[in-house]
């Protein structure tokens, strides 16, 4: 059995594969909407066609397939006879064919008329008859209806119209003039116009009209911020080779190829239409392709997701939050707030339930396109598989490091936390790995310097304490010296000094012994990175493998050197032993004389042993003076080094702050007129407050209030002032003397910790609460309602990321006006660059946001699911009905859309 078999047999993987084949909502289709029949060139351009009609149709359809064109509209002048031939050829190649025709109004304006795909040719002929075209042969005879009536009649018959070559001969803006042209342009039934290239290439007078900048022609409402009406490329296709020209096609986003799909695209061109030269780029962001459950409330449910905006809708209890929290659980993303954590754990325990497996199909595009499967069975940890089912040594965060999931009310909880707001802003900083690494190194170096200084100070205290005994001992010794003991015991006194020499030898050699032990632990050097397995497949393996001998030689020579040092130390130890034994023999020769002196002294009641003991103590203490000098020098060096480290530490913190400042400016630019952000250096004084309460004790509230109210603060300066004394601290910072004294009495260790304390920057966020079109009115988060706070935070979350953003019912914390005026426009802009998954009861998000995929959940007893008719975009009638009947403000949202887009 091969390694892929377990995965192939897994029900979860089968469900994912099934989901991957499901429709994923709206996507861009390349469309040619003015395709002419075999007879067109000969009749209207006098050029004979070398192909038969069958050859012409087949070659044109084949060329469409080759060019990635999936939709054709057959629109001959006053003629529908070739529609069925294209239908038959298209069906064999999965090309969708719209039937229609092109007519000329009584004013001489050409109009493309397109009808539902299923419309019969006979019915199309009747529609031509209604427009005054009764001759069934191709002709250029004008209709008997004016421009506005043609638009109205086609609409009544379920079709759509496009003003053909609008800026050229027989086009609306060319054939009509004055008030007649203005009336035609402003006709509410005018849904789209065809231009020969890009808007920027149009003559300036025509461009001003089409971009709604000409006040005489201004349409209200415009189709979007930049266009009065939808603009497409759909030049005449007169043969297979015409499809090679980008101006003959447009990219139109639909969830299903239908007249309603075209209509919705024309109503929302900014989101749904790209001209022929503006081919939609392939997604560059990571995304969740599909989700499946085995067990629990969503047992055997599998869903396919769109790469852009996905909206989960449904009544309460249908499983929207279950999907959001399932994704969070599978990817092991911890909730950021206490209430969100409680809700998450409750859903996993009571709805998803133990034993349920959640499977995600994930597509990562950086550094290359790779598909992964993440599986997690409650309550076990997640596992990551590759595309053939092998378990990988990865965690979900390794493939989705920046994905964000927010449960109900979680955004409002973040809005109320200064720390989390700053952390949110840090998403927009360009992380410098070198700075991060240096910061960690500095933290360790400062910790070590503090420990070294503390060790030196402790040893100094011990030395000073011992040296404090020396004056008393020396004074006692003088009494013995006055009795003449110094001369009588001179030789024995000198032997004591020699004895001290021998006692110092081991500690001097111990350093070398420790070095040798450390070297021996390092050899042989680790060369697993040069092993055959590590180098397997490398193009220069034969060359690099030669480095093994280099490391082997280094290890050999280090071992040889350590052996040499060990031998030298052993030899030194032996020689020292010889010298010490010889010295011992010499000492014996004076021992008898010493004993004789002692007996003499005893007779005179003089304690010679006490004298000798004092001498020994003096000989032990005298070297401590040198040690104290060495410790003082080491202390000064450590303090100087620490000051350098603190200066560099402050530089690193400054760089991090500047990165946040740049992020704040960037966010403010991107959310201009909506949200402003400003960063305050060392604005979070809570760490300082906690530190003083812990290390000072007693009442320090006045000091804390004073330090909190300072606009800028330097902890190093404060510590230096503490060392200067309470008067300096009290005077400079206006702190009560008693509190200043307590602060100054902190241990030196605590003062050094205070120097290293990091006071995070805080983020000041302001929201413009004015309605659209009104003068700006900025308020800080502290002055906003809960809904307004959440609005500001959600606008930040929508910005700049290539990983999915998943939010559960954001409207619970948002004002409805801010959803439609602030959130939705930014969502529409950003959804092309990242995947959004929103669960909502609010219709404005899927309708005004023009969701690429709407998933309508339904629950029956203890099981949830998604009926096929509840899947799609708002170009699906069943989905429109679902939105109107299920979501709060459904009809109102469509009304807002009608007012905004004219439908």
Image (cartoon, rainbow, N blue to C red):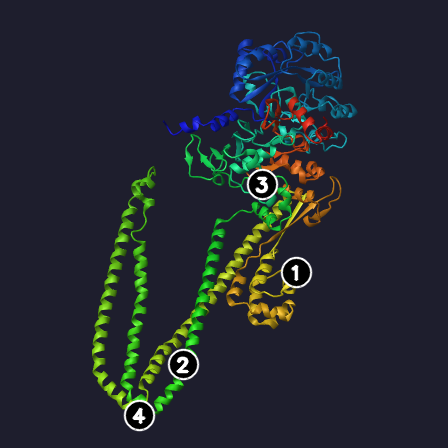
Which label sits in the foreground, 1 or 4? Answer: 4
Residue drawn at x 59%, y 22% as measured from the top left: 31
Which label sits in the foreground, 3 or 1? Answer: 1
Q: Quadrant of the C terminus?
A: top right
Residue 625 left/right relative to 285: left
Residue drawn at x 55%, y 15% as measured from the top left: 90
Residue 13 pos. (x, y %): 47, 28
Which numbered disc, 4 or 2, marks the residue that appears first in the sequence?
2
- Tell me whether the residue at label 1 lies in contact with that at label 4, contact meaning CB atoms closer than 8 angstroms: no
Q: Label 3: how many residues lie within 10 Å, few (<14), some (14-19) or many (20+)?
A: some
Q: Which mark is residue 604?
A: 4
Element marked by disc 2: helix
Q: Which mark is residue 135?
A: none
- The Cα–Cα distance between marks 3 and 1, rounded to whole angstroms, is 35 Å
- The Cα–Cα distance between marks 2 and 1, rounded to whole angstroms, is 52 Å
- The Cα–Cα distance between marks 4 and 3, rounded to whole angstroms, is 98 Å
Residue that numbered label 1 is attached to: 709
Residue that numbered label 3 is attached to: 800
Which label sits in the foreground, 2 or 1? Answer: 2
Q: Quadrant of residue 170?
A: top right
Element marked by disc 3: loop
Residue that numbered label 2 is attached to: 470
Element marked by disc 1: loop
Residue drawn at x 33%, y 85% as measured from the top left: 611
Residue 22 pos. (x, y %): 54, 24
Which numbered disc, 4 or 3, marks the residue that appears first in the sequence?
4
């Amino acid at each position: 059995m091969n390694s892929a078999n377990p995965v192939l047999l897994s029900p979860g993987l089968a469900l994912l594969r099934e989901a991957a084949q499901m429709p994923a909502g709206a996507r861009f289709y390349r469309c040619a909407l003015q395709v002419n029949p075999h007879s067109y060139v000969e009749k209207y351009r006098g050029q004979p066609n070398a192909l038969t009609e069958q050859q012409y149709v087949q070659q044109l359809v084949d060329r469409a397939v080759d060019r990635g064109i999936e939709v054709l509209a057959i629109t001959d002048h006053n003629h529908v006879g070739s529609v069925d031939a294209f239908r038959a050829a298209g069906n064999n190649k999965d090309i969708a064919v719209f039937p229609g025709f092109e007519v000329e109004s009584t004013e001489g304006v050409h109009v493309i008329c397109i009808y539902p795909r299923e419309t019969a040719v006979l019915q199309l002929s009747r529609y031509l008859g209604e427009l005054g075209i009764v001759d069934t042969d191709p002709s250029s005879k004008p209709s008997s209806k004016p421009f506005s009536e043609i638009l109205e009649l086609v609409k009544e018959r379920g079709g759509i119209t496009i003003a053909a070559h609008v800026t050229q001969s027989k086009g609306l803006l060319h054939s009509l003039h004055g008030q007649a042209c203005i009336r035609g342009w402003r006709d509410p039934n005018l849904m789209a116009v065809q231009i020969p290239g890009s808007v920027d290439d149009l003559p300036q007078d025509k461009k001003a009209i089409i971009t709604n900048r000409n006040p005489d022609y201004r349409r209200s409402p415009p189709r979007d911020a930049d266009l009065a009406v939808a603009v497409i490329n759909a030049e005449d296709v007169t043969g297979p080779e015409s499809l090679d020209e980008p101006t003959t096609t447009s990219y139109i986003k639909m969830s299903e190829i239908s007249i309603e799909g075209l209509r919705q695209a024309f109503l929302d061109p900014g989101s749904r239409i790209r001209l022929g030269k503006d081919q939609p780029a392939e997604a560059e962001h990571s995304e969740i392709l599909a989700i499946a459950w085995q067990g629990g409330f969503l047992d055997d449910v599998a869903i396919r997701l769109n790469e852009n905006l996905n909206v989960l809708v449904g009544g309460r209890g249908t499983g929207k939050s279950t999907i959001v929290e399932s994704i969070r659980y599978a990817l092991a993303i911890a909730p950021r707030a206490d209430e969100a954590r409680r809700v998450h754990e409750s859903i996993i325990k009571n709805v998803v339930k133990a034993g349920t497996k959640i499977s995600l199909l994930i597509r990562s595009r950086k550094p290359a396109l790779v598909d992964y499967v993440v599986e997690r069975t409650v309550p076990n940890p997640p596992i990551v598989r590759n595309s053939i089912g092998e378990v990988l040594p990865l965690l979900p965060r390794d493939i989705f490091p920046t994905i964000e999931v927010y449960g109900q009310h979680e955004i409002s909880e973040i809005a109320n936390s200064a720390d989390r707001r700053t952390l949110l802003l840090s998403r927009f900083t360009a992380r410098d790995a070198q700075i991060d690494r240096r910061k960690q190194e500095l933290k360790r170096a400062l910790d070590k310097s503090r420990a070294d200084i503390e060790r030196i100070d402790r040893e100094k205290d011990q030395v000073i304490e011992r040296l404090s005994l020396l004056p008393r001992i020396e004074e006692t010794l003088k009494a013995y010296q006055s009795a003449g003991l110094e001369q009588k015991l001179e030789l024995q006194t000198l032997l004591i000094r020699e004895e001290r020499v021998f006692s110092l030898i081991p500690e001097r050699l111990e350093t070398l012994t420790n070095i040798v032990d450390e070297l021996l632990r390092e050899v042989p050097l680790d060369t697993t990175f040069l092993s055959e397995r590590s180098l397997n497949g490398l193009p220069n393996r034969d060359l690099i493998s030669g480095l093994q001998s280099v490391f082997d030689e280094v290890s050999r020579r280090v071992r040889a050197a350590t052996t040499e040092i060990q031998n030298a130390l052993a030899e030194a130890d032996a020689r020292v032993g010889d010298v010490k034994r010889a010295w011992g023999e010499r000492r014996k020769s004076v021992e008898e004389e010493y004993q004789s002196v002692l007996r003499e002294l005893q007779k005179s009641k003089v304690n010679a042993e006490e004298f000798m003991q004092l001498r020994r103590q003096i000989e032990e203490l005298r070297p401590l003076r040198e040690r104290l000098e060495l410790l003082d020098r080491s202390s000064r060096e450590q303090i100087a080094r620490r000051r350098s480290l603190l200066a560099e530490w402050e530089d690193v913190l400054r760089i991090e702050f500047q990165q946040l400042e740049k992020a704040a400016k960037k966010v403010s630019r991107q959310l201009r007129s909506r949200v402003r952000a400003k960063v305050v250096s060392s604005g979070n004084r809570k760490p300082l407050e906690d530190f003083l309460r812990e290390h000072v004790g007693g009442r320090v509230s006045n000091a804390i209030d004073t330090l909190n109210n300072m606009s800028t603060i330097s902890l190093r300066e404060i510590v230096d002032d503490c060392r200067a004394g309470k008067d300096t601290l009290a005077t400079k910072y206006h702190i009560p003397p008693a509190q200043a004294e307590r602060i100054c009495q902190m241990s030196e260790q605590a003062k050094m910790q205070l120097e290293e304390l990091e006071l995070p920057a805080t983020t000041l966020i302001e929201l413009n609460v004015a309605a659209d079109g009104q003068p700006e009115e900025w308020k800080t988060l502290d002055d906003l309602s809960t809904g307004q706070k959440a609005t500001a935070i959600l606008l930040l979350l929508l910005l700049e990321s290539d990983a999915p953003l998943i939010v559960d019912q954001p409207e619970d914390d948002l004002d409805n006006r801010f959803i439609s005026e602030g959130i939705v426009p930014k969502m529409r802009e950003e959804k092309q660059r990242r995947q959004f998954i929103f669960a909502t009861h609010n219709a404005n998000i899927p309708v005004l946001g023009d969701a690429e995929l709407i998933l309508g959940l339904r629950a029956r007893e203890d099981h949830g699911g998604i009926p096929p008719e509840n899947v799609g975009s708002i170009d699906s009638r069943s989905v429109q009905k679902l939105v109107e009947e299920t979501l709060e403000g459904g009809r109102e949202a469509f009304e807002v859309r009608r007012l905004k887009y004219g439908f």
